[in-house]
Image: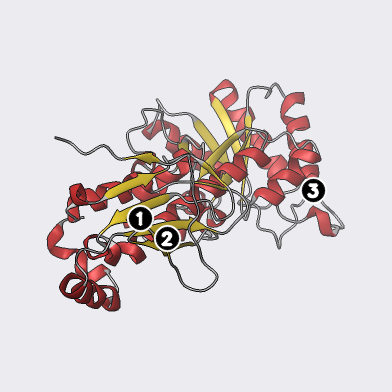
């Protein structure tokens, strides 16, 4: 973020306080400490914070101590400590909180999904849940959390692996709901790409998957189920509460039918409303899913950051209920000569 436009992203009261302190207390040395309150988190966004401070402040005139991206955090663990005249950096408090809150939340969400899936592939499908200009930043955070499959290049960054490829429902709709015709067209335009067929368009996953397998055989790399939580697939004649949406019975039956028809090579990808709790349930029920597509959950922000000024000229002084917290794991930013 360049110097000329940074102030419009900073709360006015921070900018006003900066001017007051620069005039009346320019030599006071303050320690400002940043933390989040949840019991566990994967830190992300710190690299962006350091770049922000280096590009927009006279950072060689104060001390920066921090934890690296990917660090595992405990409750109220200090992740960043700035020490010096606070008018040099204090006005960035809110901006730093926001950077860390968003990226740490996404990295932690990604990590929790990977853990719930027993380290199976998680596909980051959050593009439709947020403004497109955030995709690069969100992708960085997701990679820190352990994800390496994405729906677009912005999220994937410089990762050389090919992005997850499937198809939207509107492609099938455009061929009058005929999945075979849609897949034929896709294969002609992209003969070098793996074919992953979306098999829930007509709410008959088993029939659609077997038909596309019969048509494409070894060229069919995978099938994706995207059944909504308020719909039960056609295979359930009198659906019970646990038979709506993505469920273990449906995935198990699909795996069974694929294997019976020489489709052992076909991977099963499931998506639609997934989160760590739902993924864990599928895993506990031994659903033979090969990958999970997760969207909306990835962008739920739960790890909000705060900053406290806790030391003034070597004296521990802070607002009521707050105090200096030492973190020996912090590393110092080495200033360039």
Residue on which the image places disc 2:
130
Q: Are marks 1 and 2 in contact (CB under 8 Å)?
A: yes
CA separation in Å, label 1 and label 2: 7 Å
| Alpha carbons under labels 2 and 3: distance apart | 34 Å
Secondary structure category for the residue under label 2:
loop
Q: Quadrant of the N terminus?
A: bottom left
Write the residue at 69% across / 59% down.
229
In the image, 251 versus 138, the foreground residue is 138
Name the one closer to the observer, 75 or 314: 314
Comes first in the chain, label 3 or label 1: 1
**In terms of sequence position, does the residue under pointer 2 or pointer 3 come before the other?**
2
Q: Is residue 3 above or below residue 151?
A: below
What colouring style does the render use? secondary structure
Q: Point out residue 257 in the picture as x, y percentages from the top left corner.
A: 76, 31
Q: Which mark is residue 78?
A: none
- The correct choice, above or below, for 269 with respect to 80 in the image is above
User: Residue visible at 67% across and 41% down?
Assistant: 116
Where does the image place residue 187, in percent across and percent down from the top left? 44, 32
Residue situated in front as seen by the camera: 142 or 210: 142
10 Å neighbourhood of mark 2: few (<14), some, or many (≥20)? Answer: few
Task: Determine which quarter of the picture holds residue 5.
Answer: bottom left
Alpha-carbon span between mark 3 and mark 1: 40 Å
Indicate whether 287 appears above or below 57: above
- The percent position of residue 172, horizontal first and vertical second, equals 51, 49
Q: Assign a secondary structure to mark 1.
A: helix
Identify the residue under disc 1. Answer: 134
Q: Are marks 2 and 3 in contact (CB under 8 Å)?
A: no
Q: Would you call the spot at circle 3 few (<14 residues within 10 Å), some (14-19), or many (20 or more)?
A: some
Q: Tell which tag, 2 or 3, sits nearer the viewer.
A: 2
Q: Name the quadrant containing residue 253.
A: top right
Q: Is residue 230 left or right of residue 106?
A: right
Secondary structure beneath label 3: loop
């Amino acid at each position: 973020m360049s110097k000329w436009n940074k102030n419009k992203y900073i709360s006015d009261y921070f900018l006003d306080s900066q001017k007051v302190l620069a005039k009346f207390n320019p030599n006071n040395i303050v320690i400002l400490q940043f933390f989040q309150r949840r019991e566990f988190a994967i830190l992300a966004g710190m690299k962006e914070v350091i770049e922000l401070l280096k590009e927009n402040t006279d950072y060689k005139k104060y001390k920066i101590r921090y934890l690296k991206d990917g660090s595992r955090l405990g409750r109220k663990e200090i992740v960043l400590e700035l020490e010096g005249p606070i008018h040099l950096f204090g006005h960035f408090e809110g901006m730093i909180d926001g950077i860390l809150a968003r990226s740490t939340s996404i990295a932690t969400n990604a990590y929790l999904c990977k853990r719930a899936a027993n380290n199976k592939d998680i596909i980051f499908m959050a593009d439709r849940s947020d403004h497109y200009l955030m995709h690069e930043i969100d992708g960085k955070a997701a990679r820190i959390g352990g994800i390496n499959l994405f729906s677009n290049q912005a999220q994937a960054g410089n990762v050389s692996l090919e992005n997850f490829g499937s198809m939207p429902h509107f492609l099938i709709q455009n061929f009058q709901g005929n999945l075979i015709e849609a897949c034929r067209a896709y294969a002609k335009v992209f003969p070098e790409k793996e074919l992953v067929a979306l098999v829930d368009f007509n709410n008959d996953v088993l029939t659609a998957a077997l038909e596309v397998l019969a048509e494409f055989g070894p060229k069919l790399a995978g099938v994706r189920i995207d059944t909504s939580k308020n719909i039960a697939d056609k295979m359930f004649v009198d659906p019970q509460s646990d038979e709506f949406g993505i469920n273990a019975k449906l995935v198990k039956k699909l795996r069974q039918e694929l294997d019976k028809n020489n489709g052992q090579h076909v991977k099963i990808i499931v998506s639609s409303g997934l989160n760590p709790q739902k993924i864990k349930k599928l895993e506990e029920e031994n659903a033979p899913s090969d990958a999970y597509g997760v969207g909306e959950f990835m962008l739920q922000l739960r790890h909000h950051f705060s900053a406290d000024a806790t030391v003034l000229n070597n004296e521990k002084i802070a607002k009521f209920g707050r105090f200096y917290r030492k973190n020996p794991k912090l590393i110092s930013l080495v200033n360039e000569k």
